[in-house]
């Protein structure tokens, strides 16, 4: 075990910032996340500046990822989950399972040929602010994961970055410390059906608006692709509701909505 080593569980903004600070102090870092990219929920944020910066902090992730890429002592383990943690002397012995991802993002050049060729249209680009950038395959919709044979995306990939034959990998590391930075999961608005989410196409969540801003630099109505002339924000959906087990205020959405507006 390296005496100055750490495992960080979660590669969102908190995990990335922790990794940067630990690396800056000479500590070797293993950064683990269940997703194929780092960035977490903040990677969905879009810049809200019009004539001047609105201080929405969307750019902070880009800055921190740039710092992380300059830190050779940080190793990122994508598509990975911690299976077991055991005490080992003064440190920890950690078992990690890395699930196979058909697209090797370190070889993907984001040409988009795979997405054009896919008959199920289940290949999409990663979020712009996430790292590494490339294309990912939705395994819930891909023919290869439903018993059918299809290799059209792999056949057109110019860098041979796509393979459906990669096995899972179980490996073990030893570290002196563990940082848990697992982030958050957004509230599912389907649990408040009175607001019409998933029934009316133009009822969307704030994070979905963020993704629109990030990808397109503008917001369009899902129903017809037009820019909306009127927008209403409904606050506190999912919070201040003891029946849902969330009796507290999120302390986020008021200022957050103002910045989006």
Image (spheres, rainbow, N blue to C red):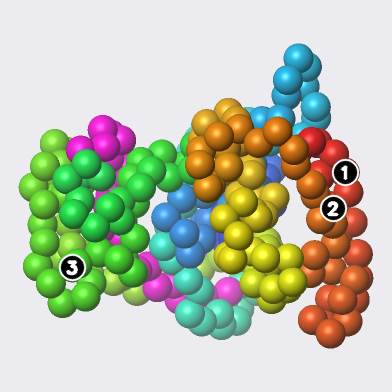
Residue 2 versus residue 158 in the image, above or below: below
Q: Main secondary structure of the magenta part?
A: loop
Residue 116 versus residue 59 in the image, above or below: below
Describe residue 155's horizontal placement relative to residue 186 as left or right. Answer: left
Q: In the image, which residues are magenta?
A: 92-113
Q: Where is residue 101 in the image (x, y as percent from the top left)?
A: 30, 60
Residue 25 versus residue 250 in the image, above or below: above
Q: Where is residue 192 in the image (x, y as percent from the top left)?
A: 73, 73
Give the mark nearest the N terminus, 2 or 3.
3
The residue that label 1 is drawn on is 255
> Which residue is pictured at 88% across the width and 82% down the height?
242
Front-lying residue, 28 or 210: 210
Distance between the alpha carbons at the discs numbered 2 and 3: 41 Å
Neighbour tally class for label 3: few under 14, some 14-19, many 20 plus, Cα within 10 Å? few
> Which residue is pictured at 83% across the width and 52% down the height?
253
Neighbour tally class for label 1: few under 14, some 14-19, many 20 plus, Cα within 10 Å? few
The residue that label 2 is drawn on is 252
């Amino acid at each position: 075990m390296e005496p100055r080593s750490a495992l960080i569980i979660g590669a969102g903004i908190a995990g990335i910032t922790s990794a940067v600070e630990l690396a800056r102090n000479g500590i070797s870092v293993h950064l683990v996340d269940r997703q194929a990219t780092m960035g977490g929920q903040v990677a969905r944020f879009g810049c809200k500046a019009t004539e001047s910066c609105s201080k929405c902090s969307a750019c902070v992730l880009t800055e921190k990822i740039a710092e992380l890429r300059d830190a050779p002592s940080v190793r990122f383990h994508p598509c990975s989950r911690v299976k077991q943690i055991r005490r080992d002397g003064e440190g920890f012995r950690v078992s990690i399972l890395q699930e196979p991802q058909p697209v090797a993002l370190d070889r993907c050049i984001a040409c988009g040929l795979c997405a054009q060729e896919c008959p199920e249209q289940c290949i999409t680009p990663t979020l712009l602010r996430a790292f590494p950038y490339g294309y990912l395959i939705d395994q819930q919709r891909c023919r290869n994961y439903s018993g059918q044979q299809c290799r059209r995306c792999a056949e057109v990939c110019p860098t041979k970055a796509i393979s459906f034959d990669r096995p899972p990998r179980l490996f073990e590391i030893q570290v002196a410390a563990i940082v848990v930075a697992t982030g958050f999961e957004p509230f599912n608005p389907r649990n408040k059906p009175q607001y019409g989410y998933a029934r009316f196409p133009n009822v969307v969540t704030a994070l979905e608006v963020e993704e629109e801003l990030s990808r397109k630099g503008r917001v369009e109505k899902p129903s017809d692709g037009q820019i909306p002339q009127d927008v209403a924000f409904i606050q506190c959906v999912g919070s201040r509701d003891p029946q849902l087990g969330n009796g507290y205020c999120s302390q986020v959405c008021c200022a957050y909505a103002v910045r989006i507006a």
